[in-house]
Amino acid sequence: MSFVAHAQAHGLIINHAIPDGRWHRVPTVDKPRKRNGAYIFDGNSGVVKNWATMESFARYGEKVNQFIKYFDDSEERIKHARAAKQAQELINKATMATHPYLKAKGFPDAKGLVIGEELIVPMRDINTQRVVGAQRIQVSGEKRFIPGTRAKGAVFVLGRGRDPWLVEGYATGLSVQAALRFSDVRVVVCFSAGNLAHVARITGGRIVADHDGSGTGQRVAKASGLPWCMSPNLGDDANDLHMRSGLGAVRSMLRECVIG
């Protein structure tokens, strides 16, 4: 059986195969208007898969394991590229405006990128500053990332100062920035504790941890070896402290950054 016949037997719509050792997406019999089929062929060996009907790859010839590994990596790159493109399109369409979420977080006059009822927070690669995705915040406060966003190393930076202060969330970052208003700082929003740990190894600086019930924020901060602080109230982040006790309380917390 030829490789083309092998692919057709698994539902891929294909008349010839490109033997370049790269992945190609093609329509399938069950979804002829989409590209749910994929194949890679080097002239001797290859694999095919119908993503709608097959749980594993259908192998053809020998030495195909490297193809499957490459596909996993390639698929991730495709997803990341799509997320980055979608994020850039949202950013281009958005306008600078106030938003109910910002008002609810204590910043009624602050402006962000708004499209429709959503507040768009760009996510950029910490090293290249290229857009890799975006966080979409609803009026209700619900937050969603664009599917496929490469979260590792993705940040949103507030300010242009020399001294980095790392936080998890956007509202937390706004409160820290406001409390350090007259200092030479930049606030780096990392979107999660796990990513904050990664970014901290690149930027150094100080960490403002969320005082979450799981203790994750505190563990990440301690493990970084950097000066850190957090609200004394369980369940709080810096914005919660800001809303409850004012920016003075946030400033006092930030002055108490410790190592270890």
Image (cartoon, rainbow, N blue to C red):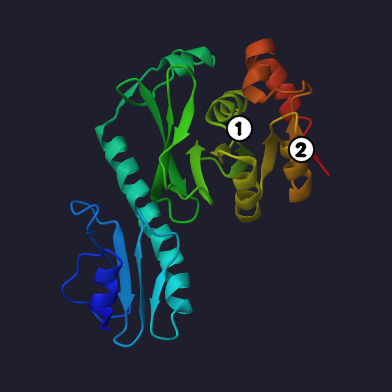
Q: Which residue is drawn at 60% across and 50% down?
A: 199
Residue occupied by mark 2 = 218
Is residue 22 visible in the rendered image? The answer is: no
**Left or right placement of residue 250 versus residue 223 in this view:** left
Q: Residue at x 62, y 21 (%)?
A: 239
Where the C terminus falls, by quadrant? top right
Res. 214 mark:
none
13 in relation to 59, above or below: above
What percent of the width, then of the height, locates residue 29? Answer: 22, 58
What percent of the width, then of the height, locates residue 73? Answer: 45, 65
Instruction: Specify the amino acid type for callout 1.
Output: Ser
Looking at the image, which residue sits at the far right?
Answer: 260
Q: Is label 1 in contact with label 2 (beta carbons under 8 Å)? A: no
What percent of the width, then of the height, locates residue 244? Answer: 67, 11
61 in relation to 29, above or below: below
Of marks 1 and 2, the one in the foreground: 2
Is residue 145 visible in the rendered image? The answer is: yes
Mark sitting earlier along the chain (1/2): 1
Q: Nearest the camera: 30 or 257?
A: 30
Where the N terminus falls, by quadrant? bottom left
Q: Nearest the camera: 27 or 152?
A: 27
Q: Judging from the image, what secondary structure is the residue with disc 2 in? A: helix
Res. 183 mark:
1
What percent of the width, then of the height, locates residue 180? Answer: 61, 28
Judge the density around disc 2: few (<14), some (14-19), many (≥20) Cα neighbours within 10 Å: many
* Cα–Cα gap, marks 1 and 2: 25 Å
Q: Residue at x 71, y 37 (%)?
A: 217
**Left or right placement of residue 15 versus residue 124 in this view:** left
Judge the density around disc 1: few (<14), some (14-19), many (≥20) Cα neighbours within 10 Å: few
Q: In which quarter of the image is residue 75?
A: bottom left
Q: Judging from the image, what secondary structure is the residue with disc 1 in? A: loop
